Amino acid sequence: MRLSASGARIWILNQLDTERGRWMLWLPVAMGLGIAIYFQLTIEPPLWLGPVLAVGGLAATVLAPAGGAARALGVGVVAGSIGFGLATWRTSMLAAPTLSRPLFSINVEGRIADIQRLPEGVRVVLEAVRLKGNGAPILEMTPVRVRVSLSRGAPPIGVGDRLLVLANISPPSGPAAPGAFDFQRVAWFQQIGAVGYALAPAVVIEHGKPDGIVRTIDGLRADATARILKALPGPEGGVAASLLTGEQTAVTKDINQSMRDSGLAHILSISACTSCSSWRLSWAVCATASR
């Protein structure tokens, strides 16, 4: 049965009146809707659009009758505009250079910002990066961070150490299919401008200590993960590390698939979002990585 325009309006007003006692609880939903709208856009909106929409919604709220559905809708528009504006601002604040083309046999030097233990090896995120080819600096925009998978036989490393590795690197790739996992977007919010793999064992140029509370936490997590995997090698250690430190990279693909099939994958995702350092990066990264 199709509703007429007036019937649809009456139905909406009735629903709003039913939810009157819970209107405040819908504000986070409205903010999330504004964020979702931002991520559905195909072009980057200007920074002023969110604040302008929020001001317009606020003006409509003030002019609407007190206690009415129109005022509630106006408050919802304000909350949605705030979410939209925050997403736009966050994306702009994290803008960083991205590698424009693949580079082969490049010396990548940088300070270790994060260590990820994989079933087949170790992956590190380097910051304060320097790129050199045949002893000469690379004449293009250097990424803020580079993620490199190290070859087997990597030396003992810790967060804060300065590393030199010969690697092939390339820009972060986009989704393999429409609607698939978008690593390019995740890398943007982590300011990772290049990813690659080592061609030779890495060399620790200088041992260092994490600077700041965030890096200290990252270092403690990496050390705890390494100890867990050393004491409990194999797939069991990967699951234990994921539950205790939030580091999911050591969980094998077979176990991940089994967790999804059994409906228990959310346990690992919750551990990652509550234990790991993704809280400092972006709500979008954590939400996207938890899929």
Image (tube, rainbow, N blue to C red):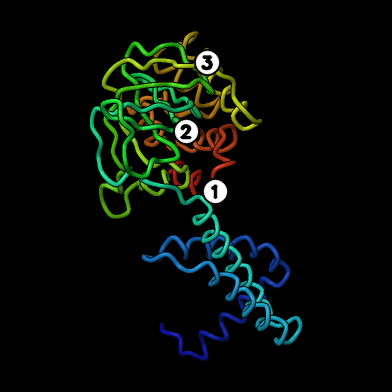
Q: Tell me the residue that label 2 is attached to.
A: 127
Instruction: Kindly report the distance in space between the C-alpha atoms of the residues bearing marks 3 and 2.
Output: 15 Å
Image coordinates of residue 209 in percent, x first then y, are 59, 20
Q: Residue 113 carries which label?
A: none
Q: Residue 207 carries which label?
A: 3
Judging from the image, what secondary structure is the residue with disc 3 in?
loop
Residue farthest toward the top in the current orientation of the protein? 231
* Mark 2 Cα shell of 10 Å, populated few (<14), some (14-19), many (≥20): many
Q: Residue 283 carries which label?
A: 1
Rendered residue at 44%/15% (across/down): 204
Q: In which quarter of the image is residue 29?
A: bottom right
Question: Which of 95 and 81 lies nearest the eye of the viewer?
Answer: 95
Asked if residue 194 lies left or right of residue 263, the reply is left
Q: What residue type is labelled 3?
A: His
Image coordinates of residue 119 in percent, x first then y, are 36, 20
Asked if residue 253 lies left or right of residue 12, the reply is left
Rendered residue at 58%/75% (across/down): 53
Q: Which amino acid does label 1 sit on?
A: Trp
Asked if residue 104 lies left or right of residue 61, the reply is left
Judging from the image, what secondary structure is the residue with disc 2 in?
strand
Question: Which of 263 and 81 lies nearest the eye of the viewer?
Answer: 81
Q: In which quarter of the image is residue 200?
A: top left
Tell which circle, 1 or 2, labels the residue nearer the N-terminal end: 2
